[in-house]
Amino acid sequence: MKRLPRPFYERDSLSVARDLIGCIFVHRLGNVRVAVRLVEVEAYRGEMDPGSHGYGGMTPRTEVMFGAPGQLYVYFTYGMHYCANVVCDRPGVCEAVLLRAGEPLEGIDEMRVRRPGISDRLVAAGPARLTTAMGIGKDDNGASLLRGGDFWIAEDDETGEWRAAEVAETVRVGLSPGKGDDLPWRFVVPGHPYASRRT
């Protein structure tokens, strides 16, 4: 696998989101590695996007979103779950891509420990499910995807085929009316069994 370089992330979130489809998201947990192939993501565009945490400007919570591209923005939601985003564009500009779902490729036994009793299809089918399966929490907010750390996103020999295939662009999931729920900034492999919901 080839780790995605910094220039990949130095673009707007719509461009990055579309090109993340088919890439492999990896987390090294000690001596174990877990990995999923990304099949569903959503773009968020900061101060131009009422669905984004950065819509009202930078706060202590969203500081990472306004930071350097190629790092994770991890946030807590609904009082029980974490979700992970990839920070894009350039420092000072709030653009990010929510990682919504992936097909498990490596470390499935480790994922099952965190998601017991769940079918393989649903282990990482949703943003909170994905972070739970991959062992991502609050301490990972700001983690780099670039510097030989425990997280990275990579391409393999199949990634180009996934990018070249049809990718559906739909409205994003779970937003309140009038909060960007009408923007077609969700990218998903149509009919993929590991997506959070069918398209």
Image: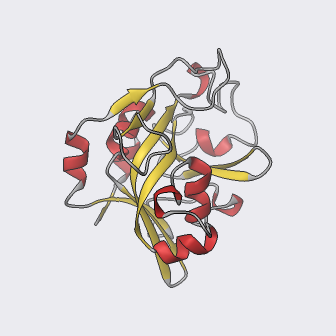
- The foreground one among 88 and 42 is 42
Q: Quadrant of the N terminus?
A: bottom left
Which is nearer the eye, 67 or 191? 191
In x, y percent, where is residue 183? 50, 20
Q: Is residue 106 above or below residue 136?
A: below
Residue at image position (39%, 49%) is: 193
Q: In the orientation shown, which residue stands out farthest toward the top?
A: 178
Q: Position of residue 61 (x, y in %)?
A: 74, 43
Q: Is residue 84 visible?
A: no
Q: Is residue 198 left or right of residue 134?
A: left
- Tell me if 166 is positioned left or right of 64 in this view: left
Residue 35 percent location from the top left of the image: 43, 66
Q: Answer yes or no: is residue 20 visible.
A: yes
- Counting from the top left corner in percent of width and height, residue 46 is at 58, 28
Q: How is the image coloured?
A: secondary structure
Out of 177 and 179, give the one closest to the viewer: 177
Counting the numbered discs, the total is 0
Against 112, residue 76 (above or below) is above
Specify the quadrant of the image occupied by residue 112: bottom right
Residue farthest bottom in this picture: 31
Residue located at (64% from left, 20% from top): 179
Quarter holding the C terminus? top left
Give the residue displayed 25% in from the left and 61% down from the top.
Answer: 156
